[in-house]
Image (cartoon, rainbow, N blue to C red):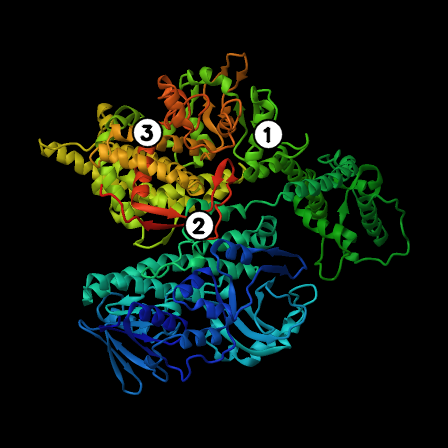
Amino acid sequence: MEKPDFNVVIVGGSVAGLALAHCLEVLGVSYTILERGDKIAPNLGASIGILPNGGRILDQLGIFGHVESEVEPLEVARICYSDGFWFKSQYPKVLQSNYCYPISFLERQKFIQILHDTLKGKDRVFTGKKVVCVEDGKSKALVKTADGTEYMADLVVGADGVHSIVRSEIFRQLQAASLIPRGQAENTGIKYEFSCIYGTSVNVPHVELGVQLSSLDNDVSIHAFTGKKSKLFWFVIVRSGPEQYQEASKYSEEAATLICERLRHQKLNDSLAFGDIWSRRTIFKMTPLEEGVFKRWNYGRLVCTGDAVRKMAPNIGQGANLALEDAARLTSLLAQKMQVGDLSHRTISAMLQEFAEAQRGRTVEMCSSAEFLVRMHACQGWGRWLMGRCIIPLLRDAPAGLSGMSINGAARIEYLGLPARSLEGAWDPSFSSVLSSMSYLTPKPSLPLLALLLFIAAAVYLIRRLVHDAWKWRLAGAACPANAQRLSSPRDVTEWLQTRKHLRLGLPFEIQDSIPAPCRRLSDLIVPSDVLHLNKIGFRSLSWDKSAQGSYGRAARHIPTSAMGPQNATDSLTGNYTALHSESSSYVADKSFLLGVIFLTSLFVLYWKPSAGVKAPFVSYRWSWEPPLLVHIRYVFGASTMIKTGYEKFRDSMFWLSRYDGDVLVISRNHLDDLQNRPQRELSAIHGLIENFGGRYSGITALGEDDIGVRALLAKFNHNLPQLYGEMKDELDFALTEELPPCQDWAPIQAMPFLLHSIERVLHRVLVGPRVCRDPKWLEAAFGLSHNVAIRQIAMRSFPFFLRPLVNLLIPWTWKLESCKRAATKILQDELERRARAEDEDPAYVKPCDLLQAVADMAEKERCRDDTKRIANQALLLLAVAGHSTAGSASQTLLNLLARPEYAELLRDEALTMLRDEENCFTRSGIARLWKMDSFLRESQRSTPVTLLGFFRTVIAPNGIKLQDGTFVPHGTRLAMPVDSISHDPNVVSNPDEFDGLRWYRKRREAASEAQKHQFVSTDKAHLHFGYGVWACPGRFLSSDVLKMLLTTLLLRYDVKRPAGTKLPETRHFHEFPLGDLGMSVLVKQRDDAPVF
């Protein structure tokens, strides 16, 4: 229904403006489009790329089908360099697989025409309307055009490109209001270093459909994309310079033709040169490439979108897609304000500022990526060349991994449902999606072997060179004999040069009489008499004064010419000589030395592994001389096979696993009693956990330095947990309203993000209390903290030890983690100080029962209550390790429930009975009576655990430890147990490959004396997923209660099912962790008979 009391004027009728009109039309908001040109869709020769983030928005608007019918989807990219080297990337196919939308290229004119033709309010689109003035007002904004027409609007949106009049008016009014300095330039931050020639060709030979062709060379890159009807869209990016931007003639048709003619012979594949494309052009144009983000986007009722706020090179393909995201985010915010009903000037201004802040972060990230990519494609700088030419081709598929990162977190239209085809996409930047992207950044398996072969060849050359030259070095540093004589004739100089040449080549020589005489200026050069007997003493034994080295080096390498000035070395020779090689000889020696260093270093990198210490077999090596680095790479995706193989062969002894982060000794469960009784000063569980997650790069190293948080959790918090059930239930209800859409009918949700956010919200409530847990700043910092901790841990474990310091500096999760940690620590410090003041000032103050207070009380007992930073850090560390593991368990439980829907009714009946008996409240006794649910959770954990290894320990005793069987385990050894293999061993669990959700329920019923043994939170030698003994996971009781509350609430209030025609994802592993389908969608519907509790 249209809202006549709110009107939007859109300045600009291109992609950004028409997309915004579509969004407003669906929202029911009146709009007017003012386009400066005489036509909405002129043919300028440009093409446009629609990526999955833009495709989803178009699909929400019901337009993508029109676009898809006009495109030839990309499947593969072929990237080549001027030296003939090339490689392929599957990034188009990967993006379509991950997000369910193809990469679509079509004419910009055609796309704009589709947007216009599918618009219902075409009568509100006016062409030939040049806007000359825009004024903000308290009640309305005023827009004036060159023909004298005036328009009043509640909101004015500048979608009029890089030379936006609306942005200029915003800038003018900001200066008038003294909000920015008057001398500041409007385009501050925008730079001009490249130019772009874009065009369309037809019937180009040697072109395959669905293949992107890219040719990269110094200061130029060429890109071509196939389209419908034998069309080929292409663009050439050349480096120009900022001064060229001021000269319009530089971008003329003649200039473009001159550049393209010069590039005619540049190859895009073996059979296709750019000249073939250029000769079949139908239209082309040259334009400067502006790059950067404009600083000011909004003022009052005025705001800019699309190219009016950002400009980027087309290499990344996100320009039009970000314009679509702008329209989606702006109208989503507007829809929220309209629901409230407050559309005052102050509200609109605040909304536009919120829009600018929300989009700016993603805009800066995309523009920075495009800026780097266009320069890497142009081979600008040796670092970028090395990255593009040498490093990226050696990775599995870097473009596929990195391109997905630009899609995650994209905006969508919040007030419209998600299209059916997008339900399977992994849209949120979750833990698993980043892992999936990172899997494409791992080295190709053949890389270490190739490096080994290359360095063996280098070694053969080096050894030959060293043997040949060794005798020449034995006299280096000897004093020059006293009987020095002149080279008094050209014959002597010629003999000297020929002798040097033949000695270097290892050939016999004799003096030639008929060689033309060189320049006579060398007749005064004094040399040692030994130079006439080089066949005896070797060329490198010559001793020279430092000041004579220059002239000697030149003489030894060149036949003298008139370019050399007069030389007289007589005065430079002294009685004290220094052993100096000539420049050319030094170069040969240095090169050999450098090759030797590289060879030995490479062998060290390929074959280095620490001393095992314990004599046990390595199960991950295919042959005895296989480089450990190759084994480490295979472990990343083959850990499950390695662990299973090792357990089958050595289940009653021990074996080694070789990994990037060091070797791990996997031990038999026969050693459990011995190990679990060891004191922490000998065998540390905390250090074992830290080392397994990246050591000093794990983000949780403080747990090994200070265990006050763990002690508070064990001694105080777990005992108070039942007192927090009411708060947990309240937060769970709030989380479901925030994380679930209205679902009176079947509605799609992405399972993993929903579970992660819901569980983390509940954990926040019991860890930091109600005042903090819903604070938007806290949520942003806390969600970011747990997310970045997990990603950084896995990232650092995916690189060899010698690369980790560099990788730690380069990956974005390092500084994101520190930023989130600082913000969260500050919030908790403020909360701790507030509580301390309240306790001191109010005698009736009652302390909360949350974990933050438990840590603070423990610190007070140790007389460090005022150390709020220490307390806050410990609380944050526990939060960082709790969320993802609990969410992982919830995800696997939900998958098992969807695969076996017959259990849903059983668990629902049990939960309903419990709530009725407990007066619709969660209590300790009530949760304890959920035996069937407890059994289902334990069986899910057994069949699909969150890690294949457990019981991590590190030997920290300086002198090592000795096991009961006499095995000595030295200091620093890392231990683990194959918990998944144990729980799938038929000698331990009957029918282990069969999922039996009531397995443990029946065991508890059969033997009442062992009822406690078979609980979800119980640990024994057959169930080690929570650890074993005193140092079993201290947070398992909280995790169990949260999972049971969540599962009970979902079962009683909602029906959940898989979308029709979809299959449950297969479990894959990244290292020893399961890598599920992050974008897995499920359908949720509110139950009509849902009880109120």
Say the numbered circle drawn on residue 1079.
2
Image vertical order of residue 566 relative to residue 1013, above or below: below
Label 2 SS: loop
How would you rate the neighbour count of disc 1 (Cα within 10 Å): few for under 14, some for 14-19, many for 20 or more?
some
In percent of width and height, residue 883 lies at: 36, 38
Residue at image position (20%, 35%) is: 919
Residue hosting label 3: 1037
Label 3 SS: helix
Report if the CB atoms under discs 1 and 2 are less than 8 Å apart.
no
Task: Please state which amino acid type lies under the numbered disc 2.
Answer: Gly
Q: Is residue 530 visible?
A: yes
In percent of width and height, residue 256 lies at: 56, 76
Residue hosting label 1: 645
Residue at image position (59%, 59%) is: 76
How would you rate the neighbour count of disc 3 (Cα within 10 Å): few for under 14, some for 14-19, many for 20 or more?
some
Task: Please state which amino acid type lies under the numbered disc 1.
Answer: Thr
| Front-most of residues 169 and 772 | 772
Task: Please state which amino acid type lies under the numbered disc 3.
Answer: Phe
